[in-house]
Structures are given as C-alpha cells and as structure tokens.
Image (tube, rainbow, N blue to C red):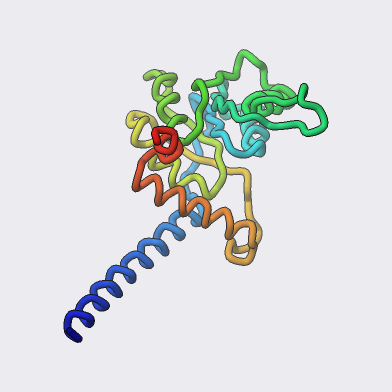
C-alpha cells in the first residue's frame, strides 16, 4: 500500500512540476518585450478591440505615414452612459470617434467584422477582408495581448507578414504593480483557455 501511495505522489508531484514550468514559460512569453523591427510603411494598420489607447496610437501611426488604411474591429459591446441612456454607444463607435478627432479621414477607416467578441473572431473577419494586396500589416494591441493574438492571427493569416506595436510602455517591472499582475494573470488564463478550446468566448455561447 505504501509503495502505491509513494508512486501516486511521485507521479502527482512530477506532473505538478511540469505544470508549474509551463505556467512560468507562458508568463515569461506574455510579459516579455517584443523585439520585432518595424517597417517604414505597412499595407494596413489593424486596431484590435480592447483599449481606447489603441485607437489613439493608430491615429498617430497614420499621421506619421506608416499606412494609408486603418482597419477597426467592430465590437458591438455597449459603453453605457449612466447619466443619459441616449448617449450609450458601441465600443467601436467610440474608437471611430477617436480616429476622426485625430484627423484620420473616414474613407481611410475600414470597420471589419459583424460583432467581434474574441480575438479569434477578429482573425476570421480579417482573413475575409485582407486580400493578397495586403502583405504587411501592423497590429495595434496591448503588450500582454500580443503573445496570444500572434498565435491566433498567424494561424488564420498565413500569407501575411504581421508585426505588433503597443501603447503601454511600462517604466516598472510588472510584478511590482498590482494592476499589471492582474493583467498578466488575466491574459494567462485566456491563453490557457485558448490552448484548451481555441475560441473560449464563443465556446461559452454554444452551451
């Protein structure tokens, strides 16, 4: 009996050790700085939904001449105005306002997708939008989202050269900031769910 218990705990301990190593690896991949060298010009700038800072950065990239087109993810999640329901709007409409206020012409903005609820939705929608003329694309997202979004986008846009840029330049190490710790753990969970279910957000809607 003791030998069975010893074998069980030995196997359990070994598996736990491997899981911990995998989690450390994923945290390192999610949190590390991206080292891709940017081109001087791209066929399109892509704004992933998630943070309005991305729209501001995309506006500046456009004004710097890095691309003549901006693709904006259409997420129909509502931003509620608790003072006046008449001013409720979809999140992509808010991003669109930011772009227009920052002097990006409306005809240079292409809203893609129907209601992108996940990064996988965005990748599928982009695959349908970007023809062979779009070879080099620059994706604007947040730092901790890059590892997962790169895996997803490269699996759907196999013929594209994809670079990433992010607005959140952090001055301190992520483990010294509780908000960054939360962001890392949140993205770690999403990455694990991605490996398990591919598109977890839409997986939930099937149940």
State left or right for residue 95 relative to residue 203: right
Figure check: 24 above or below 93 = below
Return the x and y of residue 155 as percentages of the image width and height: 34, 36
Compared across the picture, whether 102 is left or right of 9 comes to right
Q: Is residue 55 above or below residue 96?
A: below
Which residue shows up at 40% across the image and 51% down it? Answer: 192
Seen from this angle, which residue lies furthest right? 83
Q: Quadrant of residue 126?
A: top left
Q: Farthest residue to the front: give it.
A: 1
The quadrant in which residue 15 appears is bottom left
Query: Whole-percent x and y of residue 204?
Result: 43, 38
Give the quadrant of residue 99. top right
Q: Quadrant of the C terminus?
A: top left
Q: Is residue 14 left or right of residue 194?
A: left
Q: Between residue 98 and residue 37, name the one nearer to us.
A: 98
The answer to whether residue 192 is above or below residue 135 is below
Q: Position of residue 36 (x, y in %)?
A: 46, 45
């Amino acid at each position: 009996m003791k030998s069975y218990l010893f074998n069980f705990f030995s196997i359990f301990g070994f598996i736990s050790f491997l899981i911990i190593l995998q989690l450390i690896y994923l945290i390192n991949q999610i949190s590390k700085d991206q080292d891709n060298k940017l081109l001087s010009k791209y066929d399109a700038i892509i704004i992933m939904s998630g943070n309005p800072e991305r729209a501001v950065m995309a506006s500046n990239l456009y004004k710097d001449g890095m691309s003549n087109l901006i693709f904006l993810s259409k997420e129909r999640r509502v931003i509620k105005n608790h003072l006046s329901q008449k001013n409720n709007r979809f999140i992509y409409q808010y991003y669109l306002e930011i772009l227009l206020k920052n002097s990006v012409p409306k005809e240079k903005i292409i809203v893609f997708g129907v209601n992108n609820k996940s990064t996988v939705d965005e990748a599928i929608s982009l695959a349908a939008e970007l023809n062979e003329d779009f070879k080099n694309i620059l994706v604007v997202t947040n730092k901790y989202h890059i590892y997962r979004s790169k895996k997803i986008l490269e699996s759907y846009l196999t013929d594209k050269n994809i670079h990433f840029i992010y607005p959140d330049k952090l001055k301190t190490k992520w483990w010294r900031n509780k908000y960054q710790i939360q962001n890392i753990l949140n993205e770690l969970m999403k990455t694990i769910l991605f490996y398990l279910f591919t598109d977890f957000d839409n997986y939930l809607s099937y149940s």
